[in-house]
Image (tube, rainbow, N blue to C red):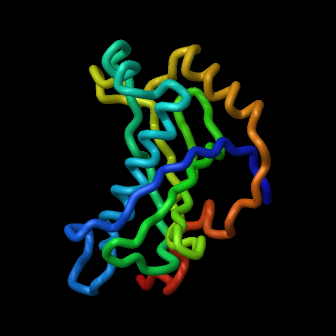
Amino acid sequence: MAYSIMEEHFCGNVRAEWVDHNGHMNLAYYVLAFDLATDKFFQGFGLDQKYRDENQLSTFAGSVHVHYKSELHLGDEFEINCYLLGHDRKRIRHMNRMYRISGGEEVALMESLQLHVDLSARRVCEMPDELFSSLEKLQSVQGVIEIPPEIGRGIEKPAIEG
């Protein structure tokens, strides 16, 4: 399955406070790194602090699925590529892929559904035409990528007992 995408890059390295008792980057910091990359990605199409301040609108995470594929250790450098998978008036679906810079191995993958929110009411709402148009423009100029098999899947095994 292939989708149109918009790609953005974010680079970082594993900090000492991100390493857990197992000697690798803790799962919470993968999510933090993905979130920092998402912030940069969203700024690229106008969803930035100015947008939030002027409109009292933002996005909240509606669903996030992270797939861990390999460990990162103290000092490891990584790159995160962000891709727009789809959108409508109330939602933005995107994917972030994290790679070890040394060797290029994919170490984690995140799929996220962001909900557009009115910060005054704290409720999901439609995005203004300007933001929606910006996403439409991105969608129209994007290339096509092969979607990893993890995208769109939930936790499947072991079966839920009950």
Residue 150's place in the image compared with 84, above or below, is below
Residue at x-position 46% and y-position 28%: 47
Looking at the rendering, which quadrant does residue 153 occupy? bottom right
Residue at x-position 65% and y-position 46%: 85
Residue at x-position 38% and y-position 56%: 33
Q: Nearer the viewer, residue 157 or 143?
A: 143
Residue 159 in percent (x, y) is at: 51, 84
Q: Nearer the viewer, residue 99 or 148?
A: 99
Residue 18 in percent (x, y) is at: 26, 68
Looking at the rendering, which quadrant does residue 29 occupy? bottom left
Residue at x-position 56% and y-position 60%: 97
Quick one: quadrant of the N terminus?
bottom right
Taking the image as shown, residue 114 lies to the left or right of residue 146, namely left
Quick one: quadrant of the C terminus?
bottom left
Residue 7's place in the image compared with 136, above or below, is below
Taking the image as shown, residue 33 lies to the left or right of residue 5, namely left
Residue 100's place in the image compared with 159, above or below, is above
Residue 2 in percent (x, y) is at: 79, 55
Taking the image as shown, residue 9 lies to the left or right of residue 138, namely left
Residue 78 in percent (x, y) is at: 47, 64
Q: Nearer the viewer, residue 83 or 113?
A: 83
Give the mark count: 0
